[in-house]
């Protein structure tokens, strides 16, 4: 077990911090869920897209009832601005802090909601969508990092999944609102869009009441505020051990943001020595040895793993951290060979985007991108946004489709909660592999049935609904929450914001591509669209099995060690010789 000070307890403050900040995710989910329902409302189509109604009146195929590039552009405009804002947002989250970015995004949410709900032409809809996309992208990055850094290791999945739970809750609320406003003609669609201002206002208020994460405060040179924030979220005054480890991590990856000038250089040096000695003792408690079983290479867990190199000591060259024993002492006072004098940390002022491109950070660059790719090309997110249209294409009547879309939203939301518990019990890999197999089977079965029987048979329609629900539940137990949590877990402090920004950039890029083409693809490919998306699930299963190491129970500052012990990623890590075949815990001696 980890030291108790690293474990922490589930406190009211922790739940309050994660749930209150997740109100921003409710706004994001509401916007995603409201789009499909509004796009199917008669009043909305009459004002902005009369050609779609004319196309439906002409008796077009059930697969092609909503095939309009302009209609898709309005929905995809949210992701277009997200593509532009993702990388700058990562910089802002790192420089200004997680909570400050949320405070900026709150008013932007309200402006975008006002523009969309009061729109008189397509240009206002697109402008509102662009503002919503910018705020959603920035909030997405800040929220996931916020909940990950606030939670202790053994609760990280549960707290991290509040983001996905809040997104799915927003979708459910939006679909319920759409069902109630679809018959309010011609302004029901305006009411649907305007009601998103309620969670947006609550999010703005909560952002001004919550503290920033201790990790972010330390990285920006605010140790006193970091101590207060950690004491508040842990519900105890005794946070010295955890604060020391977070301080060490912040020293290894110094922030580029504004820092407060130190008042006592000697005091700071003593604090640095004390933190280093604590970390050195921690390092001595754990040892890496070879594990010869090739079958265990992806299932290794590290419940007590220490840093592979000595803590940082500020060296003689300005602006550079050197890895060396303090005053010539190794952790065991016997000259441990694991303390590498030649291992050097990056330059203090290395730009963050260049750091993630370094060879040693290749896993932190590629795996978050892979998570985003599989999230999007599973087909779920766009199917969720266009759930009513998709259900109509299965042969369901439009009014019934709106009701069934609510059921899908409820299933999405409820499916997140089992994943909160199971991910911390069985691990992230299991929660990605098993549901991915179910998603693959659901999509292939649905595609084959539609190809053979077509959407005109009632039994096909309802079987399609059942498979659609199964697919949705599986996604929200796997790639939905775990796909957001995993990238934040595997990154170091110096790469976390940038890696999350790249992941969100990919999310918006692929969402824009799919959002702009989904209804056209549905019209052209018909049942083949489900087989098309199933191919990405087959690829996802292979990728997770071979390239995703387990992160269950591993503290954030120790997850980089996973790649040193991985059969493939160890070639990119400077300490690969320490863990050439794996890592196994060695019991510590008394004293």
Image (cartoon, rainbow, N blue to C red):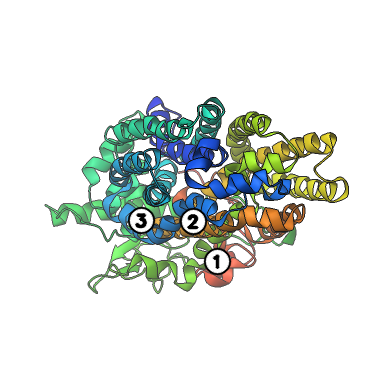
Question: According to the image, label 2 marks what residue?
Answer: 508
> Residue 520's quadrant in the figure?
bottom right
Question: According to the image, label 3 marks what residue?
Answer: 89
Q: Nearer the viewer, residue 521 or 209?
A: 521
Give the crowd class for mark 1: few <14, some 14-19, many >=20 residues within 10 Å. Answer: many
Residue 31, position as x, y percentages in the image: 47, 40
Quadrant in which the C terminus is drawn:
top left
Task: Please report whichever mark, 3 or 2, sits nearer to the chain's N-terminal start.
Answer: 3
Say above or below: 228 vs 589: above
Q: Nearer the viewer, residue 348 or 83?
A: 83
Cα separation, mark 2 vs mark 1, equals 38 Å
Question: According to the image, label 1 marks what residue?
Answer: 578
Task: Please report whichever mark, 3 or 1, sits nearer to the chain's N-terminal start.
Answer: 3
Q: Is residue 584 visible?
A: no
Give the crowd class for mark 2: few <14, some 14-19, many >=20 residues within 10 Å. Answer: many
Q: Secondary structure at mark 3?
A: helix
């Amino acid at each position: 077990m980890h030291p108790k000070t690293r474990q922490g307890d589930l406190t009211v403050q922790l739940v309050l911090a994660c749930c209150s900040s997740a109100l921003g995710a409710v706004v994001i989910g509401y916007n995603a869920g409201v789009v499909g329902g509004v796009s199917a409302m008669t009043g909305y189509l009459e004002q902005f897209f009369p050609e779609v109604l004319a196309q439906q009146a002409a008796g077009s195929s059930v697969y092609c009832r909503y095939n309009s590039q302009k209609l898709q552009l309005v929905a995809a405009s949210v992701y277009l601005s997200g593509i532009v804002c993702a990388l700058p947002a990562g910089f802002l989250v790192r420089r200004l802090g997680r909570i400050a970015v949320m405070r900026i995004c709150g008013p932007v949410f309200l402006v975008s909601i006002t523009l969309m709900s009061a729109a008189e032409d397509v240009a206002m809809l697109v402008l509102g969508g662009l503002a919503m996309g910018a705020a959603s992208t920035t909030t997405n990055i800040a929220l996931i990092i916020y909940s990950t850094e606030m939670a202790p290791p053994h609760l990280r999945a549960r707290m991290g999944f509040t983001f996905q739970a809040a997104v799915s809750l927003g979708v459910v609320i939006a679909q319920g609102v759409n069902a109630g406003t679809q018959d309010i003609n011609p302004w029901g669609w305006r009411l649907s869009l305007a009601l998103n201002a309620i969670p947006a206002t609550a999010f703005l208020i909560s952002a001004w009441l919550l503290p920033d994460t201790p990790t972010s405060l330390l990285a920006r040179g605010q140790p006193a505020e970091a101590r207060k924030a950690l004491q508040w979220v842990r519900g105890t005054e005794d946070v010295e051990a955890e604060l020391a480890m977070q301080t060490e991590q912040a020293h290894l990856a110094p922030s580029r943001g504004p820092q407060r000038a130190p008042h006592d250089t000697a005091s700071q040096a003593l604090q640095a020595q004390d933190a280093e000695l604590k970390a050195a003792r921690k390092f001595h408690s754990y040892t890496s040895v070879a594990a010869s079983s090739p079958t265990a290479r992806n299932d290794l867990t590290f419940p007590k793993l220490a840093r592979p190199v000595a803590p940082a000591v500020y060296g003689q060259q300005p602006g550079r951290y050197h890895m060396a024993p303090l005053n010539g002492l190794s952790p065991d006072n016997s000259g441990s060979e694991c303390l590498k004098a030649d291992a050097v940390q990056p330059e203090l002022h290395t730009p963050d985007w260049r750091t993630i491109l370094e060879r040693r950070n290749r896993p932190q660059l590629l795996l978050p991108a892979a998570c985003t790719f599989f999230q999007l090309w599973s087909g779920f997110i766009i199917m969720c946004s266009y759930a009513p249209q998709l259900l109509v294409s299965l042969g369901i009547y439009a009014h019934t489709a709106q009701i069934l879309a609510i059921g899908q939203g409820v299933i999405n939301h409820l499916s997140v909660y089992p994943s909160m518990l199971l991910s911390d019990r069985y691990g992230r890999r299991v929660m990605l592999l098993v549901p991915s197999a179910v998603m693959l089977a659901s999509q292939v079965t649905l595609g084959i049935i539609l190809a053979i029987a077509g959407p005109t048979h009632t039994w096909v329609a309802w079987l399609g609904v059942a498979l659609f629900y199964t697919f949705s539940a599986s996604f929200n137990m796997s790639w939905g929450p775990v796909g957001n949590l995993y990238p934040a877990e595997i990154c170091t402090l110096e790469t976390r914001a940038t890696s999350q920004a790249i992941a969100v950039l990919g999310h918006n890029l692929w969402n824009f591509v799919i959002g702009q083409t989904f209804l056209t693809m549905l019209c052209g490919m018909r049942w083949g669209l489900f087989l098309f998306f199933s191919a990405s699930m087959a690829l996802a299963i292979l990728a997770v099995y071979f390239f995703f190491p387990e992160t269950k129970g591993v503290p954030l500052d120790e997850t980089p060690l996973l790649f040193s012990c991985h059969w493939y990623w160890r070639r990119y890590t400077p300490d690969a010789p320490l863990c050439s075949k794996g890592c196994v815990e060695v019991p510590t001696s008394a004293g």
